[in-house]
Amino acid sequence: MKTLLTFCLASVLTVGFAPALQAQTSLPEIKIISFDRAPQLKPVYQHSTPDNAYLTRLRTSYQLEKVVAGKKSDFDKVKAVSNWVRQRWEHNGDNEPLKNDPISILEEAATGKKFRCVEYGIVVSGALNALGIPARTLALKMEHADTISYGAGHVVAEAYLKDQKKWVMVDGQFDVIPMLKNTPLNAVELQQALSAGAPDLKVVSFSGTKAADYFSWVAPYLFYFNTRLDNRYDVERVLGSIMLVPKGYKNLTAFQKNPIQNMVYTHSLKDFYPEVK
């Protein structure tokens, strides 16, 4: 796997670098962290429906219905989209697109340009939303991401499987979905399974990423989690972002020594992982 340098969206996902994915023989020490289950903030999330003009253009221009043709479950569709996005371009952690929306990224990628993990997350979530599977871009941040100068974050996507009534993590750069036995996991569930030493963890990946290597690489980033409250397309977003903070730990108000703005904080899994109707 090529060197991975993670950049996050300014003001929402912020800027950062991540080191290369290398073969590992064991997991690093992972803290046991916990969260509240009762709602605290009851935040309002905004999403575009698949008939939104932008998502309709994305779906038709890139024939996304063909990508998921024959896939009956939401999970099978998510796997197909993850693999499709991973094949659109090769990773380059130093290159940013001119615009950060899915269609613009895909148009530039078609000319041979290569992009960061951020762009994989954006395109995966956009394609899934266009197909009627609610999805969002998710930033992962290390425990000491406020004082680390670089290498403190990574970006993935999360999708909501209506037929399973749960969120799942999708790392488009590595074409990885974490699994515990036959259950796909969201980012927090992955952290808790890793910290508990769950023996049945694995990954779904059509790109050949090895579970042991990926888990060793991603584990340090699974501490703070943030995403947009407003995930609409082709409109002016009016809401900020929400960060999930482990119980007993401070709110992360800076990332790589840069202030974080327009963020609300919660310890509640209910706040961060709402059920989508």
Image (cartoon, rainbow, N blue to C red):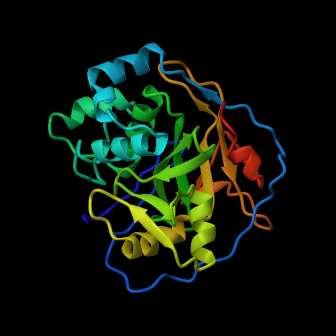
In this rendering, position of residue 169 left or right of residue 68 = right
In this rendering, position of residue 143 left or right of residue 128 = right
Q: Residue at point 27% right, 64% down?
A: 208
Q: Residue at point 34% right, 53% down?
A: 173
In this rendering, position of residue 277 left or right of residue 199 = right
Is residue 143 something one can see in this rendering?
Answer: no
Residue 141 on image: x %, y %: 56, 60
Residue situated in front as seen by the camera: 272 or 205:
205
Q: Quadrant of the C terminus?
A: top right
Residue situated in front as seen by the camera: 104 or 150:
104
Q: Quadrant of the N terminus?
A: bottom left
Task: Using the image, determine if residue 204 lies above or below residue 231.
Answer: below
Residue at the bottom extreme, as displayed: 25
Q: Residue at point 70% right, 41% down?
A: 274
Q: Quadrant of residue 227?
A: top right
Residue 100 on image: x %, y %: 39, 34
Residue 52 on image: x %, y %: 48, 16
Q: Quadrant of residue 237?
A: top right
Residue situated in front as seen by the camera: 93 or 156:
156
Q: Quadrant of residue 161?
A: top right
Is residue 19 something one can see in this rendering?
Answer: yes
Task: Using the image, determine if residue 63 lies above or below residue 9.
Answer: above
Residue situated in front as seen by the camera: 14 or 72:
72
